[in-house]
Amino acid sequence: MAPRPKREIKFIENERSRLSTFRRRQCSIFEKADELSKIPDVEVCVLLVSPTNTPYTFGKPSLIKNVERNLMKELEQLEMHEELLRKRNQEELEKSKMMEKVELEDLVAFKKKLEALQADRKRRYEEMKASATLLMLSEERENKKMKIEADPREKYELRPRIPRNYVK
């Protein structure tokens, strides 16, 4: 059997076609994510933004919990890295004191490095906090949308059609 020819991905001009294509692809991506989440010890997060700028999320066990846990791990790693750098700088400072007198310029440079590290850590923390807030808002927005009844025809459009003469 010959392989299927690859379709060129290009912008779809017709808005209705573009939205229906998005819905089909969204459904298949979420199905794949669901299949992956059934593997033991696998956590899945998917965030899609539609052409109408509506966020759609999928997460197992929960998108927010996964993101928060990963952000907290990254924050802990940053803190450990900062502590390691602080210890290293302290050791270097002590060594230089033993060998010769530390000059004022060295101390100023050391202070600037520490301040830069603290500023970077604070900036990353604020970014993580902001992204977690955005994800929580998008999940709330999606939960509200799920409560609104959808057009029953859309349910059937998303499913693959099985021919009537199909026999298992």
Image (cartoon, rainbow, N blue to C red):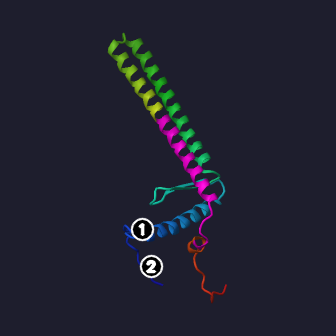
Question: Quick one: SS at disc 2?
Answer: loop
Q: Quadrant of residue 71?
A: top right
What is the residue that sits farthest to the bottom in this orientation? 165
Q: Which residues, given as a range, are shown in magenta?
A: 124-153
The answer to the question of whether label 1 and label 2 lie on touching residues, with beta carbons closer than 8 A, is no
Identify the image quadrant of the C terminus. Answer: bottom right
| Residue pictured at 44% horizontal, 79% vertical | 4
Q: In this picture, is 166 found above or below 54?
A: below
Magenta span includes 9 = no
Residue at mark 2: 4
Q: Quadrant of residue 70?
A: top right
Q: CA distance from mark 1 to mark 2?
A: 27 Å
Magenta span includes 134 = yes
Q: Amino acid at mark 1?
A: Glu
| Residue pictured at 59% horizontal, 65% vertical | 31
Task: Tell me if 117 is positioned left or right of 38 in this view.
Answer: left
| Residue pictured at 44% horizontal, 15% vertical | 94
Res 15 label: 1
Q: Position of residue 95 (x, y in %)?
A: 42, 17
Q: Position of residue 99 (x, y in %)?
A: 38, 13
Q: Amino acid at mark 2?
A: Arg
| Residue pictured at 47% horizontal, 31% vertical | 122
Q: Give neighbour class at mark 1: few <14, some 14-19, many 20+ (Cα, 10 Å).
A: few
- Could you tell me what secondary structure mostly forms the magenta stretch? helix
Question: Quick one: SS at disc 1?
Answer: helix
Res 47 label: none
Observer-side mark, 1 or 2, equals 1
Badge count = 2
